[in-house]
Amino acid sequence: MITKKIASPLFAALAAFLTYTVVFGFRKSFTVATYQNEVLWGLNFKTCMVIAQLIGYMMAKFYGIKFIGELKQEGRYKIIFSLVGIAWVSWLLFAITPTPYNIVFLFTNGFPLGMLWGVVFSYVEGRRATDFIGAALATSFIFAAGFVKTVGAWLQNTFAINDFWIPFLTGLVFVLPLIFFVFMMEKIAPPNEEDITARNLRTPIDATKRKEIISNYFVGIVLAIFIYGFVTLVRDIRDNFSAEMWKEMGYAAKPSLFSSTEIPITIGLLVIIGALVLIKKSIKAFFIIHLLIIIGFIVAGGATYLYKQEVISGYIFMLLTGLGLYLVYIPFNAVFFERMIASFGIVGNVGFLIYLADSFGYVGSITVLLSKEVFKINTNWTNFFITIVFYLSIVGVFATMAMWLFFRKKYNARV
């Protein structure tokens, strides 16, 4: 598509951040609406929407273990446009199809979008600056989750848009920016020789090699999947039902409210995770990432406890739990597997490991959401969120320590 390339890490970070931000414009704006009085099979319709989209995401992650693992560099921009196009058309069909039959289009929206993270990350992995670039890319969906909801809420409040048309019209806002930012992505230069020396050559990886990697690092990968899976569940609850939680805590439904917590979280995590680029030795950075994950659990659990004790406000609670949860979540999407590959000299790519963890993460999200609705668990979203964050934080600290011990032993045996 583009012949002249730009080698600047800052340019790559900006292109990746902006691209994935606008991708969210085709995913999450429906969550600003409550779809009141809509029921499907006796279940809350919005919860069914979230579950249907998550099923699409989950299946995309399982398929992505192969698809992203074997992804080649040629024609990636066509893949991005095709996947986003399918997702956007799904929102049009969702708007014009009567309820409850339109629920199927949440699945057809989620599946293609679930493939996009690996495609976008493939542009920037395997570089000395990947920690910074990956942090920018990963924090994009924190900022985007709030920004896209703000856009959707603004469209709804300004033009009195029906709930069912919000996702499609929000996507319309992001079409031209997407084209331009993918154009920027195509101008990112590939890793140079120094990058390859520092982080290993990144190549497509077949099924045999994928099985070999999983076998060699089985315990560590299982623990990573366990930690990431549970934090994905909690993050999804916060992301998908934040509108309900803000109302339950007594806050007015202002469009700017969704961005007011996510922007400082984005900036904070970009600084924290991006600073790992200053650590040249990958194994040292890898173990520091374990420490950051533990700190994230402590922040989230501590904020939950303080809110229950009425020491902090609901706003600070949402801000700190978001910061803590994303301090756990972001490394797995940006730098954890990147530094793991570099530390242990693994030849392959980050994508299949991220998608392996993601696939089981969405299984957990769907299971819990279904359980809450099917078994009629009598609690509001805020109380449900508080309970699960508190216990996850305790378990997460010990699981992360066990993961650190495994990789430390594995590295010592290797050297």
Image (cartoon, rainbow, N blue to C red):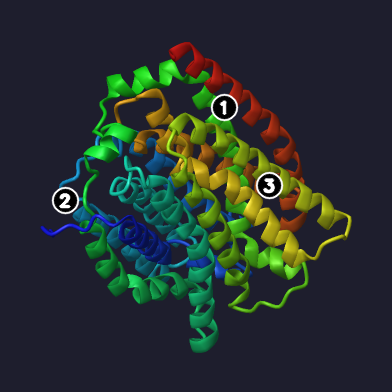
Mark 2 or mark 1, which is nearer the start of the sequence? 2
Q: Secondary structure at mark 1?
A: helix
**Which x, y percent locates residue 74?**
15, 47
Q: Nearest the camera: 291 or 91? A: 291
Between marks 1 and 3, how big is the CA–CA gap?
25 Å
Between marks 1 and 2, how big is the CA–CA gap?
35 Å
Please state, as top left, top right, bottom left or bottom right, where the C terminus lies in the image.
top left
Task: Tell me, yes or no, whether the two marked residues, 2 and 3, touch with CB atoms within 8 Å.
Answer: no
Mark 3 or mark 2, which is nearer the start of the sequence? 2
| Residue 413 visible in image | yes
Three-letter code for the amino acid on which mark 3 is drawn: Lys
**Mark 1 = which residue?**
223
Three-letter code for the amino acid on which mark 2 is drawn: Gly
Binning the other alpha carbons within 10 Å of mark 2 as few (below 14), some (14 to 19) or many (20 upward) gives few
Q: Nearest the camera: 79 or 202? A: 202
Query: How many numbered discs, if any?
Result: 3
**Mark 3 = which residue?**
372
**Which x, y percent locates residue 49?**
52, 57
Three-letter code for the amino acid on which mark 1 is drawn: Leu
**Mark 2 = which residue?**
75
Q: Is residue 401 above or below residue 147?
A: above
183 on left or right of 345 = left
